[in-house]
Image: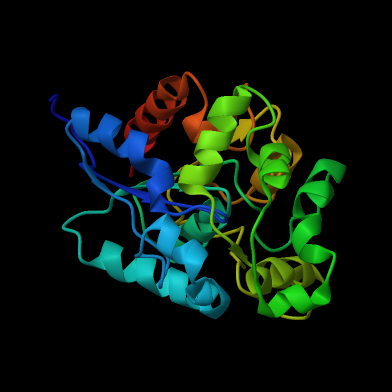
Amino acid sequence: MSTPAKGPDTIVLIHGFWVTPRSWEEWISHYEGRGYTVIAPAYPGFEVEVEALNADPAPVVALRVSAIIDRLESLIEQLDAPPILMGHSAGGAFMQVVMDHGYGAAGVAMNSAPTEGVRAVPLAQVKSTFPVLKNPANHNRAVPFTYEQWHYAFTNTSFSEEESRRLYERYAVPASGRILWNSVLANLEPGPQDVWVNYKNPDRAPLLFISGSDDHLMPPRIQASNAKHYKGAGTLTEVKLFDGPHLLPSKPGWEEVADYALDWAVAHAT
């Protein structure tokens, strides 16, 4: 095991929708091998195994963004020093909210969902989220993906059919229809909503967006637009593009992405 370079020695990994902290299993081992303490918190109610959450998705229905943010910030407050934050998909949006509140030494948002005010809506994203948004009644439901929907949204390139199915069976859980519907309506409703951030906050830690070139669920155009919203804040915000789909943290060669993310965060941590 190596020893971290001078700087943060703890990494907090924030999972996204349709998965649980299990989706970070390879990254946890990889970063621990580099000498870091790694924490991958679950959303409230997601502490159970994937199989249990699929059998009883009640915690998904009960989930609220405020509870996710409270859990993340409470965890970070218990640490001795600000950690490096990394969030994937919806976890990238939640991470931005936490950073806006003053937490974290640096942040990496991978295949990130947008924060409030980002209006880019690529057609591939519309198709990916249609299973949830096609029915307003899904606002009060936990909505799973079929394998075919998962493949289109998460593993459309880079993965063999066999590996794509294996990851679906190992990682996939339903997503909160409420939070997805609220994110769509946020730009239409007055006042700050669930994932609002102050784009002009001069005290936010450095932030890197990592995009997947073939991401259908959160295409690169979304992260590019999200990053532009921070322009003029006087904070460091960068965007890096890698080849691959939405499930970038699991694609063959994911180690390159993991090392780039960590090295960038260490180099720019405040």
Can you give x and y, in whole percent of width and height, for residue 186 in the image?
Answer: 74, 71
Can you give x and y, in whole percent of width and height, for residue 62 in the image?
Answer: 53, 80
221 vs 198: above or below: above
Can you give x and y, in whole percent of width and height, for residue 63 in the image?
Answer: 52, 75
Which of the pair 264/72 is nearer the observer?
Answer: 72
Instruction: Kindly identify the residue that appears in the image at 18 percent across and 33 percent down.
Output: 6
- Tell me if I can see residue 224 in this picture: yes
178 vs 54: above or below: below
Which of the pair 245/164 is nearer the observer?
Answer: 164
Which of the pair 45/96 is nearer the observer?
Answer: 45
Quick one: quadrant of the C terminus?
top left
Residue 173, picture quadrant: bottom right
Which of the pair 183/42 is nearer the observer?
Answer: 42
- Tell me if I can see residue 121 in this picture: no
Can you give x and y, in whole percent of width and height, for residue 10 in the image?
Answer: 23, 46
Quick one: quadrant of the N terminus?
top left
Instruction: Kindly identify the residue that appears in the image at 42 percent across and 49 percent down.
Output: 205
Horizontally, residue 176 falls left or right of residue 2, namely: right
Residue 130, picture quadrant: bottom right
What's the image's color scheme? rainbow
Horizontally, residue 242 falls left or right of residue 32, namely: right
Instruction: Kindly identify the residue that appears in the image at 50 percent across and 20 percent down.
Output: 252
Q: Give the total of numbered labels.
A: 0
